[in-house]
Image (cartoon, rainbow, N blue to C red):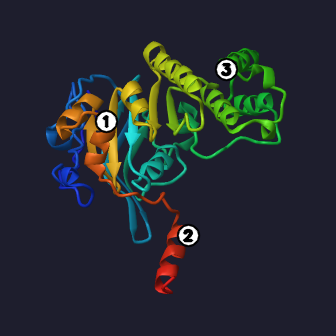
Amino acid sequence: MLLQSECKSQSILGGSDVAKSYHRPICRSREGGIATPGGLIESAVNMESMIEVRDLVKVFGSFTAVDQICFNVPEGSIRAFLGPNGAGKTTTIKMLTTVLAPTAGRIRIAGHDPVRQPMLVRRAFGIVFQDPSLDDELTGLENLALHAALYGVPRKEQGQRIEALLGFVGLWERRNDYVKQYSGGMKRRLEIARAFLHQPRLLFLDEPTLGLDPQTRSHIWEFVKGLAKEQSVTVFFTTHAMEEAERVADDITVIDHGKIVAEGTAAALKQATGTASLEEAFIALTGRNIREDEASPADRMRMMRRAWRGR
């Protein structure tokens, strides 16, 4: 039985005309289903939740980045979390991964509270960040060895796991090179290998294939799908590549202006919006306006100061 909660249904403000016709999901996950926008989109799921989010809010000053969102991600499933720039995706992931504390609401990751039990939560997941997070002054091998030590990977297993993962991402022959000598694509592949190293139950992938060639992207997604199917690893990822989301995700959650706009399979989203592709469905739900990237509180203060000065 999935978690039940009481997010009230409310009309979407802003966005496209289609988005306005939707309602905020009632965050009530029934046995055999997930939260849906106005009950329009259904998904046949009956598993325990690895991620549970209820009434989640994050406020920076007078700006609400995440506004009472609710969703559940079943164990062993792959969820795409889509939205325009500035929609609240990165802020949400930061709260799920203990980087930011919520203003209000409840989160459970593998049954643990990221605010009160951050170490238990961190041990449950692996993550590939949108921004580079490797130590350029270490070799590829040293980066993985450091991660293995920090996450308590048994010493007798470290060598085998590192060799297997570096071989998988095509970096075994470059293992002793400093990361500062790697190309952007090589660094991305090393970050992906690092995320898998401690065999987490949950993977957060923030634009994981950004900058990779099609062959490497396909190879990585096949590996990710295999983890979900064979080892019940849960995957939560963001991407701007709609074809990746359609091909890989079991279900898709769309966020815009800090609110959940829609949730369901790619086929259900296309059917509900009367569109032929996921990209068209996404545009129908979120509009065609180009968005700014999510800004930090300091960035917003600078923008406000420039506006006050008429610059």
Residue 278's tag is: 1
Q: Residue type at mark 1: give it.
A: Leu
Question: Which amino acid does the dot numbered 3 rest on?
Answer: Leu
Is residue 185 among the parts visible in the rendering? Answer: yes
**In what element is the residue under mark 2?**
helix
190 with respect to 245 (left or right): right
Mark 3 neighbour class, 10 Å CA radius: few under 14, some 14 to 19, many 20 or more: many
Tell me the kind of residue under disc 2.
Ala
Label 2 sits on residue: 298
Q: Which mark is residue 174?
A: none
Q: Identify the residue at image location x=61%, y=47%.
A: 131
**First reached walking from the N terminus: tag 1 or tag 3:** 3
Locate the N terminus and report the quarter of the image it occupies.
top left
Query: Circle 3 sits in a helix, a strand or a loop, which is it?
Result: helix
Q: N-terminal of the two: label 1 or label 2?
A: 1
In the image, residue 59 above or below residue 77? below
Q: Which residue is mark 3?
A: 165
Q: Residue 231, image x and y in percent? A: 48, 15
Picture quadrant of residue 165: top right
Q: Could one spot residue 50 in this view of the protein? A: no
Instruction: Tell me, yes or no, whether the two marked residues, 1 and 2, touch with CB atoms within 8 Å.
Output: no
In percent of the image, x 41 and y 53: which residue is there?
A: 88
What is the crowding at mark 2: few (fewer than 14 residues within 10 Å), some, or many (at least 20)? few
Q: Left or right? Give the position of 92 relative to 272.
A: right
Q: Is residue 36 left or right of residue 256?
A: left
Residue 282, percent across and down?
31, 43
Residue 228, position as x, y percentages in the image: 45, 20
Cα–Cα gap, marks 1 and 2: 35 Å
Taking 149 as reference, is 99 above or below it? below
Q: Residue at x 21, y 26 (%)?
A: 31
Q: Secondary structure at mark 1?
A: helix
